[in-house]
Image: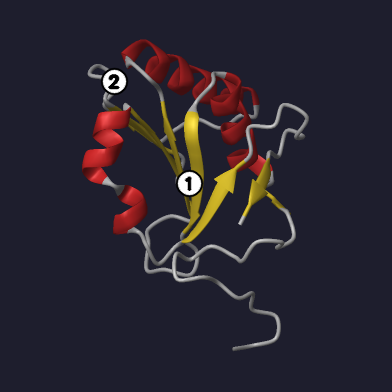
Amino acid sequence: MAKTEKRRTATGKQPAGSAQKRLTGDIAKAVRAALDKKAGEVVVLDLRHTPAFTDFFLLCSGQNARQVHAIADAVEETLKTAKLRPAHIEGYDRAEWILMDYFTFIVHIFTPQTRAFYSLERLWGDAERIDVSDDPKADAGGAVRP
């Protein structure tokens, strides 16, 4: 193991006591927008070291279709002010799983049942998992725990 590489547990998470890490840029804005709408179970998967078609997945849950819509609308509006628009949006009408493709990252907003069924965290198990803090004192980047 290289000295600069951090140790991981069997679940892919760093051991307790690891240094805090911060997300930056547009992905951080999307995380903050989701948290502002009370998204649950917010996780970022860092796919840069996997054979993926994007750099990050932002995964989060809303308790019902109304909250899923609100989260998607907030993410889109926040990124629009940063002059960033999604290349594609899927699932908005049904609001069980909304996918927003921003090329370098993809936002997935689920209902709890749909998220459990598709289990993207398990499917992309090789990716570094970044659990996002919903601490209101965190800056716009959103404090995260690797």
Check the image and tell me how it is coloured: secondary structure
- Considering depth in this image, is 120 or 69 the residue closer to the camera? 120
Residue 84, placed above or below residue 54 = above
| SS assignment at label 1 | strand
Q: Quadrant of residue 132?
A: top right
Instruction: Return the x and y of residue 66 as percentages of the image width and height.
Output: 37, 10
**Label 2 crowding class (10 Å Cα cut-off): few <14, some 14-19, many 20+?**
many
Which quarter of the rendering shows the C terminus?
bottom right
| SS assignment at label 2 | loop
Instruction: Give the amino acid at mark 1.
Output: Phe
Instruction: Return the x and y of residue 91 as percentages of the image width and height.
Output: 26, 26
The label on residue 21 is none
Residue 139, placed above or below residue 33 = below
Which quarter of the rendering shows the N terminus?
bottom right
In the image, what residue occupies the spot 55% across and 47% down?
Answer: 131
Q: In this view, does 94 lie to the left or right of 49?
A: left
Q: In which quarter of the image is residue 4?
A: bottom right
**Label 1 crowding class (10 Å Cα cut-off): few <14, some 14-19, many 20+?**
many
Q: Which of marks 2 and 1 is nearer the N terminus?
A: 2
Most extreme residue toward the top is: 66
Q: Mark 1 points at which residue?
A: 105
In the image, what residue occupies the spot 55% across and 72% down?
Answer: 8
Residue 77, placed above or below residue 28 = above
Instruction: Return the x and y of residue 100 as percentages of the image width and height.
Output: 39, 34
Q: Do the residues labelled 2 and 1 touch (CB within 8 Å)?
A: no
Real-space CA distance between mark 2 and mark 1, rounded to the nearest whole angstrom: 20 Å
Q: Mark 2 points at which residue?
A: 95
- Considering depth in this image, is 47 or 125 the residue closer to the camera? 125
In the image, what residue occupies the spot 75% across and 34% down?
Answer: 138
Instruction: Give the amino acid at mark 2.
Output: Ala
